[in-house]
Image (cartoon, rainbow, N blue to C red):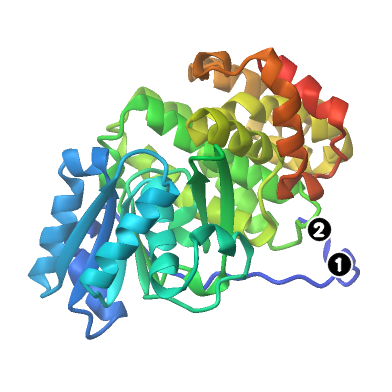
Amino acid sequence: MAPLESIDATPPFAFHAPVRVLYGAGLAGHAGAKLCEALPGARHALLVTDVGVREAGISERIEHALAASGIAAATIAIDGEPDEADVARGARLLRERPADVIVGVGGGSALDAAKAINVAAHNDGVIRAFAGFDRVPRPGLPFVSVPTTAGTGSEVGSGMVVTDADARRKYLIVDRRYWPALALLDPELTVSLPPRPTAWSGIDALAQAMGALVVNLAHPLMEPTGLGAVRLLGGNLLAVVEDGSDLDARLAMQLGSALAGFAMYNAEAGLDHAFAEVVGGAFGMPHGAAVAAFLPLTTEFTMPAAAASYGRIAREIRDDWAGLGDADACERLLGWLRDLTARLGIPSLGSFGVRAADIPDLVELTLAHFSTSISPRELRREDAAGIYERAL
């Protein structure tokens, strides 16, 4: 962390974390009671989940927990990452069956869908008109997040990513009035998550924490949140992929995800997210897998401009690197990331249909992404093309 004598010289910054977080194994069984404590008088909920979570019986468990506290829930399930059709369908249901609260149960896609449905149901116009930062005219209902993965940070953030299926692009909506009122973090809900989505979501969270520490918007409060997340995620990701029943590792990953989410929503994500969101929107590559494909490459690219930050990240991940200088620590970190993504079996861009001929269009979309504007090293057109070529 920055020495105390240097903090007076830090430019003004803000840190927002207006989310009540409850954390513990078995918490999901008390979801109704905890919701009533936080939101007295709530009697009707819209529960937004995804098909896999519903088929696993997890959303039904939450429905029963809500019912036990007198809260009736209408449920909608999305399939994959949310697009505008999913959002419109959910908004129609919410208008037909008014609710007091929206409950998102699932990974980042379900939680993002819940927030976007909330926006669409309470604001006129098409959802894409609100893309950007704090452009939503009216607030919506209170939102409660119940994550079933440890990865996206959406459970503690005010942002949502929606896909424009026709244009094959993703866009981000961030609005401070759409922070969750309550986040229920129960690692038991993540135990049944298969190794592949466990790996992808975990890499996404790690990238969020790292990005928040190196982007130009980073500030002193990124240190405890971002570095805390890096330590928890970096030290437990492989363990939880190799043994999904390891509840201690699941606990660490879920806490790390929440810390990474707080860091990202206060300083934004790194260059890996610019590339990943472009490829995900254009070719349907799952977000976490796309982040993993680019994270070692964008880390290598930005490292010369942020060696001190990456050195701190490396020393947090491995205790035996504690005595290394920044240059050696950066070298070890880059090797560790390459090895990690190789061991996790991250799919190639080509397996999702990306070809060399697509690179020029992808480069233009990437350069227009917000994360490129806050990169510690300027991303030029030829740099982006080179990263895509190596990723292929």
| Nearest to N terminus: mark 1 or mark 2 | 2
Determine the residue positioned at 25% across, 74% down.
99
Residue wearing tag 2? 2
Expressed as whole percent of the image width and height from the top left, the position of residue 249 reads 39, 38
Query: Looking at the image, can residue 379 be seen?
Result: yes
Depth check, mark 1 against mark 2: the one in front is 1
Determine the residue positioned at 57% across, 14% down.
350
Amino acid carrying label 2: it is: Ala
Task: Identify whether 188 is placed above or below 48.
Answer: above
Determine the residue positioned at 56% across, 68% down.
175
Residue wearing tag 1? 10
Task: Identify whether 102 is placed above or below 227.
Answer: below
For mark 2, give the secondary structure: loop
Expressed as whole percent of the image width and height from the top left, the position of residue 123 reads 46, 73
Task: Identify whether 204 is placed above or below 75.
Answer: above
> From the viewer's perspective, is 165 left or right of 380?
left
How many marks on residues? 2
Expressed as whole percent of the image width and height from the top left, the position of residue 144 reads 34, 66
Q: Quadrant of residue 218?
A: bottom right
Amino acid carrying label 1: it is: Thr
Q: Residues within 10 Å of mark 2 (few under 14, many from 20)?
A: few
- Asked if marks 1 and 2 touch (Cβ < 8 Å), the reply is yes
Query: Looking at the image, can residue 56 be seen?
Result: no
Q: Nearer the viewer, residue 29 or 252?
A: 29
